[in-house]
Image (tube, helix red, strand yellow):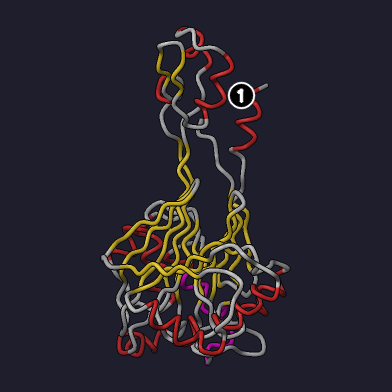
Amino acid sequence: MEISQAACMEEEMLDICLLGTGGMMPLPYRWLTSLMARYNGKSILIDCGEGTQIAMKEKGWSPKPIDVICFTHFHADHISGLPGMLLTMGNAERTEPLLLIGPKGLTRVVNSLRVIAPELPFEIVCREITEQEQVFSFGGFRIEAYRVSHNVVCYGYSIVIDRIGKFDVEKAQALNIPRNYWNPLQKGEIIEADGHTFTPDMVLGAARKGLKVTYCTDTRPTESIVKHAFGADLFICEGMYGEPEKQQKAKEYKHMTFYEAADMAKRAGARELWLTHYSPSLMRPEDYMQEVRKIFPNAVAARDGRSVDLLFQDEE
């Protein structure tokens, strides 16, 4: 019974919703690019541009339980929605601290935006990224930040959930480990009792494939993106331009075309690619997908609210 309960706990889903898919400005049919993820009772938001809380409301998700907000960079279309989001959280009587993660200067930018949201019933904690790559660990998952190439300091993020090996009943029995210790050992706890020390590696097999979602916007293609998207279950990447003739414009403004994003997804061996952060002038992204899928077949021109529940997959 104890083993089956622990196994059920591991079946938590990683819920993903791409709240918006626009770049530069919100449009009547397209909110600004923002990602929300939920796992094991934790909620993460990446970027918060103008109107993000409306997109969240349309999805039916609440901002109140958000634990972490990550910012890729400090252009307005990625952070200007923060004051309204904070006020909504406060009006919902939130009292738990809120963690904000972003590039150097985050504290200064947040304090400036809070001139119009000065009084909140919860604490705000800012953690600034100081390295080319930096990892933030939480209960059951981690957020990996990595530098990308835009005209201001900008980071991409991966949400990574590791997965322990299967519990080996035969090992536990052979070592005469009492059954009441099996459940905590499977959860990663170390047990010391009756002069003995029991560790998880004594009863667990090799680590299994976990889950990974990689997200980046506002950047030229970089090897750091390919590295961090390697083997991702879902790669969400900016595709500012679908028109092939705008390749030079993408280079000039430090953005990407659909085809560059597809090439990175292919090289990273990602399972699926969602394109996002479209130029306001790009009315029908799907018109360009036939050529994109020649490069990476499992590519999608995402629309606002596109969602997926990612589950662990057992390897045979």
Please identify the quarter of the rendering in which residue 61 is found: bottom right
User: In which quadrant is the N terminus drawn?
Assistant: top right
| 138 shown above or below 215 | above
| 220 shown above or below 95 | below
Please identify the quarter of the rendering in which residue 192 is found: top left
Mark 1 lies on a secondary structure that is: helix
Q: Label 1 neighbourhood size at 10 Å, few (<14), some (14-19), many (20+)?
A: some
**Image coords of residue 111 (percent x, y):** 45, 82
Identity, as a three-letter code, of the amino acid under mark 1 = Ile
Q: Is residue 267 magenta?
A: no
Q: Main secondary structure of the magenta part?
A: helix
Looking at the image, residue 92 sits to the left or right of residue 205; the answer is right
**Image coords of residue 156 (percent x, y):** 39, 68
State the residue position of label 1: 3
For the view shown, which residue lies furthest in the bottom direction? 281
Please identify the quarter of the rendering in which residue 157 is found: bottom left
Q: Nearer the viewer, residue 103 or 25?
A: 103
Looking at the image, residue 150 sits to the left or right of residue 243; the answer is left
Which residue is painted at 69% across and 69% down in the image? 93
- Magenta-drawn segment: 281-292
Which residue is painted at 53% across and 88% down in the image? 282
Which residue is painted at 35% across and 77% down in the image? 219
How many numbered circles does the render carry? 1
**Image coords of residue 240 (percent x, y):** 45, 82
**Image coords of residue 225 (percent x, y):** 34, 64
Which residue is painted at 54% across and 35% down in the image? 314
